[in-house]
Amino acid sequence: MNKEIYINDTATETRIAITEDGNLVELYIETPDEKSCVGNIYNGLVENVIPGMRAAFVDIGQKINAFLPFSEVGHEGQLSTILDADEKEEGEISAPVKSPEELKTGDPILVQVTKDSWGEKGPRVTTNISLPGRFLVLVPYANYIGISKKIQSFNRRKELKKIARSIKPEGFGLIVRTVAEDKTDEELKRDMDYLLNSWQELQKNLKRSTPPALIYRDMEITSSVIRDLFTNEVSRVLVDNKQMFRKIQTYARQVAPNLEDRIFFHKSGSIFEIHNISKQLERSLSRRIWIRGGGHIVIEHTEALVSIDVNSGKFIGKKNQESNNLRINLEAATEIARQLRLRDIGGLIVIDFIDMEDRGNRKKLVDSFRRELQKDRAKVSVSDVSDFGLVEMTRQRIRTSLFFSTSDECPMCHGMGRIPSKDSVISKIDNWIRRFRIHSKDKFIRITVHPTIMAQLSHGSDWEFHGMNWVGWNQVDSRQSLVDSRLFRLNRLI
């Protein structure tokens, strides 16, 4: 698989595209006004403790208080998801807050953001602080060693655990990341020193700060993507900003010299246009996405969940209907997995695949879908096909979905995707005039309408307004709104 990273940096935003065999699979966008706060660490204030919700709200200096679930207080919940049982180490944990019972309103608390704010919900935070590096993750107030489960070799895992134990400072946990599999002791030690310096700087900021205050800012989006995703699997990185290019080169020279020759500067023209990313992005972010064979999927965002509908569309198969439906569903499953990564869709997702009677085909579909989702870095959970032919799944939400970060709510329909019909608008005008006549003695009124409404009003001979009870007026002046300089104004007496 040929994996590439494209970085487009402008005055208004930074866009990072990741492609696999030429297909766009991930896109990160960051603007100066809307930077992600995931990974940032705050000296916060406990605002409210609500046992009934099993959560607390923490003031971290943002417009909306952060949400701290009780499950994110202490390390046990985190350990169970990132470590195997034999990788835990016994020892006293010296965390400032060890249990939810210790949370008191008005107390300062050290928290780290795990999810950005979304809609009317504030960011989600945890007391389980961690500092990620290139090869290691340093976990203060803990005492364990974890090895990435993606490192398969038993002997190498044993060697890495031995190295980690030799460099791990007292009172800290340490996680060895996947990219550390082929790294030397010296490289891991250098990364450890960098993380310890970051923690010491954080401690100084903490002592000087008055809550609520930001005391540690994680890397900007470009640096974090390079840190986490620029591995041996990536064949090249293209950057169209000279300053950013040199910054990435310097970083690679320090932490991964073998990757420095894979970084290239894009000199002229739009990097996204030349490498066919803009077209793919425009096509992929539409509501309807066509798939191979003529079928299509429709993605709809709602307040509670995201629904995805699979349709056969123009597909004409040569086999029986069951085989045709399986083929369409398998193509759709591949595209849906790609779209979830690309759009960064999180939360509850319900997929309505085309109905299949054969249980074996249903199992084949879900197995194929789960294999495709293994390419996703986010945590996912997928159910089997229900009796109604639906597949329910959840995907970890960390940042704002691309759908919301690249678009604004329509001021007319407010997210519904539909506006009142022309007849409905005219009916409202008619009802308003009827009410106006009751409360006013004026005999002249001017109505300014959109050109499409004007065309509907003027439909028919002699400008007759069929069904309108507008009699008794001396004059009604109906005008077309000037929505385009090429449009002209119409004035007619009724």
Image: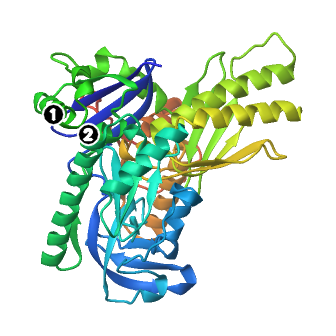
Residue 24, percent from left and from top? 43, 26
Look at the picture and state if 135 lies above or below 304.
above
User: Left or right: 4 with respect to 368?
Assistant: left
Q: Is residue 202 above or below residue 378?
A: below
Q: Residue furthest top?
A: 318
- In the image, residue 215 lies at what x, y percent? 20, 67
Q: Whole-percent x and y of residue 37?
A: 30, 57
The quadrant of the picture occupied by the C terminus is top left
Q: Which residue is mark 1?
A: 244
Tell me the distance, in whole angstroms, between the alpha carbons under discs 1 and 2: 9 Å
Residue at point 31%, 38% (across, down): 184
Local SS, label 1: helix
Q: Earlier in the sequence, mark 1 or mark 2?
A: 2
Give whichever of 417, 17 is nearer the camera: 17
The mark found on residue 222 in the picture is 2
Mark 2 belongs to which amino acid? Thr
Q: Circle 1: is it few (<14), some (14-19), or many (20+) Cα within 10 Å?
A: some
400 displayed left or right of 71: left
Q: Secondary structure at mark 2?
A: helix
What residue lies at 28% left-to-right and 60% top-to-bottom? 40
Could you say which is closer to the camera, residue 295 or residue 19?
Answer: 19
Q: Residue at x 48, y 46 (%)?
A: 158
Q: Nearer the viewer, residue 250 or 309?
A: 250
Q: Given contact means CB atoms under 8 Å apart, are the residues at marks 1 and 2 in contact? A: yes
